[in-house]
Image: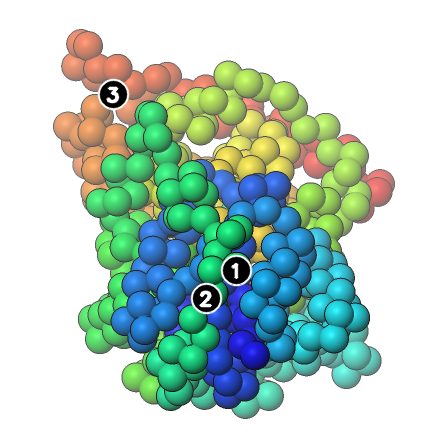
């Protein structure tokens, strides 16, 4: 009887513990279940289409295929297991509260039906419950957490593509009865129809395990040296661009960790990169311990924050028309490529939650819809971090000035000139303060949506009013 390999956020063949366990057990059928009720963002859906296509091609190269189903996960999985007469199901763990609840129910149902159901550690450096304070409680601050994680030694070495994969796939042809509820990829409607807004995504990204591996190898060889100094400069292609590959599991964080550690063991650039990778695990661990992190401020005092509603301000922010060049450059980069440089993410998030005094959840939702790397943990974690209501967060009173941030991190203005071409001809640093310049007649660039000093004062006053509660 075949084992079902249930792919989720682990769309790869190498270092996939669940797949290795399935292959070790005998014949294997691979499935991905798309539940339309579990909302995915537009950019994520675009990526997922390419990712499923690539995984199917990789499985076909080994003589198999990826079966696709649509509907509720439990119902689909139980139906498939019956139709195939399967012996069991293997999967890699997820860590968000709702997904854990679903997984626990599915495991119990399968086991009650006499099937083997086994979950595996596939997506983190170490499992969240393994990294604890001496008292056994969750860490609330990154640095001691990171020290504790490092003290556990290197993460497990990555597994190869399972040796018997082709044999296991060939031994489990999908019988006619089981094909009844399988659907073609197009039926999942993951790509935009009209308007087709994905041209910039197509020009920027190539989903799939092979492309991710290539991206990792190129990064390690060419950009890791110098990462620590250049990673904060958005005009330079200094970072890895691996976040969507990690989000969809084309690579495991263990593979990335070992590739970087082997190349630059102990040096400043490798240490800096590995600690960034650590933030990803810290975000997931925090979500594991605080399951409502995605929707609730981790510091409950912030529930009383007088967030404003400002549809015009929000729209200007979303469309990159705030009149502040570094903000507009970032928001346009996001719209066009499905990604935004980390430094600029921090600047635009600070602007939204402080100068515009809009709820961090509003920004988080826009990011969730537009980022190809939109992540259930990293996205809300970082929004809360910037907004000042998260764990180990930047204090609320630290309000980024977008002009000074632009001058510091985009000193030549190259990043702004690329994304905000209508003001590209402004010389030198004047690029960051276009309202002070004589723009040529006909230049269609907005005046600032909010006065920086006024917005800052308003934000500080709102925050100070929370003080008795803080
Ligand atoms: P690199 O500098 O090459 O870093 C390597 C990897 O480390 C990244 O791919 C990522 O997996 C991880 N990483 C780096 N910084 C962080 C961080 N601060 N938090 C968590 N992981 C990190 N990252 C996401 O993956 N998904 C999100 O939805 C997301 N939303 C964010 C929202 C805001 C408001 C902010 C400020 C940051 C957010 N980040 C998110 C974190 C970070 O901006 C991206 O991971 C990074 O820009 C991805 O580019 P890179 O792969 O080139 O990064």
Left or right: where 437 falls relative to 101:
left
Disc 1 secondary structure class: helix
Identify the residue position indicated by label 1 in the image.
Answer: 178
**Dot 3 or dot 1, earlier in sequence:** 1
Vertical arrangement, residue 148 with respect to residue 31, above or below: below
Q: Would you identify the image quadrant in which residue 201 lies?
A: top left
CB under 8 Å between discs 3 and 2? no
The image position of residue 143, as x and y in percent, is: 59, 72
Q: Where is the N terminus found, in terms of image quarters?
A: bottom right
Left or right: where 289 falls relative to 345:
right
The disc at residue 2 is none
Identify the residue position indicated by label 2 in the image.
Answer: 174
Vertical arrangement, residue 42 with respect to residue 409, above or below: above
The image position of residue 131, as x and y in percent, is: 67, 78
Vertical arrangement, residue 121 with respect to residue 338, above or below: below
**Could you tell me which residue is drawn at 35 percent across and 30 percent down?**
193
**Could you tell me which residue is drawn at 45 percent across and 48 percent down?**
183
Q: Evaluate whether residue 32 shows in this view.
A: no
Observer-side mark, 3 or 1, equals 1
**Dot 3 or dot 2, earlier in sequence:** 2
**Could you tell me which residue is drawn at 61 percent across and 66 percent down?**
81
CB under 8 Å between discs 1 and 2? yes
Identify the residue position indicated by label 3 in the image.
Answer: 437
Observer-side mark, 3 or 2, equals 2
Vertical arrangement, residue 295 with respect to residue 209, above or below: above
Q: Evaluate whether residue 337 shows in this view.
A: yes
Q: Residues within 10 Å of mark 2 (few under 14, many from 20)?
A: some
Q: CA distance from mark 3 to mark 1?
A: 67 Å
Q: CA distance from mark 1 to mark 2?
A: 6 Å
Left or right: where 35 falls relative to 231:
right
The image position of residue 234, as x and y in percent, is: 30, 50
């Amino acid at each position: 009887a075949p084992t079902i390999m249930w792919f989720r956020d682990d769309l790869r063949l190498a270092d996939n513990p669940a797949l290795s366990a399935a292959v070790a057990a005998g014949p294997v059928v691979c499935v991905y279940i798309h539940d339309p009720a579990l909302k995915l963002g537009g950019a994520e859906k675009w990526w997922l289409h390419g990712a499923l296509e690539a995984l199917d091609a990789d499985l076909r190269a080994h003589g198999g295929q990826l079966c696709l189903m649509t509907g509720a996960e439990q119902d689909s999985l139980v139906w498939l297991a019956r139709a195939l007469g399967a012996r069991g199901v293997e999967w890699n763990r997820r860590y968000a509260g709702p997904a854990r609840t679903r997984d626990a129910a599915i495991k119990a149902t399968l086991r009650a039906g006499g099937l083997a159901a086994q979950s595996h550690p596939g997506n983190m450096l170490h499992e969240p419950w393994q990294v604890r304070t001496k008292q056994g409680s969750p860490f609330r601050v990154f640095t001691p957490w990171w020290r504790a994680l490092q003290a556990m030694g290197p993460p497990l070495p990555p597994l190869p593509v399972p040796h018997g994969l082709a044999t296991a796939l060939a031994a489990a042809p999908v019988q006619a009865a089981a094909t009844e509820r399988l659907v073609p990829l197009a039926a999942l409607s993951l790509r935009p129809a009209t308007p087709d807004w994905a041209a910039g995504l197509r020009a920027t990204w190539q989903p799939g395990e092979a492309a991710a591996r290539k991206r990792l190898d190129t990064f390690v060889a060419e950009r890791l040296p110098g990462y620590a100094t250049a990673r904060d400069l958005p005009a330079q292609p200094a970072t890895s661009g691996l976040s969507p590959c990690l989000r969809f599991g084309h690579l495991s964080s263990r593979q990335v960790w070992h590739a970087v550690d082997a190349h630059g063991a102990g040096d400043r650039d490798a240490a800096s990169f590995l600690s960034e990778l650590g933030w990803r695990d810290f975000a997931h661990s925090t979500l594991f311990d605080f399951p409502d992190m995605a929707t609730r401020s981790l510091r409950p005092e912030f529930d009383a924050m007088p967030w404003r509603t400002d549809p015009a301000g929000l729209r200007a922010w979303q469309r990159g028309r705030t009149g502040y060049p570094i903000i507009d450059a970032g928001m346009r980069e996001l719209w066009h490529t499905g990604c935004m440089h980390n430094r600029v993410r921090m600047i635009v998030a600070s602007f939204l939650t402080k100068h515009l005094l809009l709820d961090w959840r509003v920004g988080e939702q826009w990011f969730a819809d537009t980022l190809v790397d939109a992540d259930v943990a990293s996205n809300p974690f970082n929004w809360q971090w910037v907004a000042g209501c998260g764990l180990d967060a930047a204090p609320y009173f630290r309000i980024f000035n977008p002009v000074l941030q632009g001058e510091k991190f985009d000193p030549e203005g190259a990043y702004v000139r690329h994304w905000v071409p209508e003001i590209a001809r402004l010389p030198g640093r004047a690029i960051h303060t276009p309202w002070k310049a004589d723009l040529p007649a006909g230049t269609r660039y907005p005046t600032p949506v909010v006065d920086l000093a006024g917005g800052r004062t308003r934000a500080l006053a709102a925050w100070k009013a929370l003080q008795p509660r803080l």
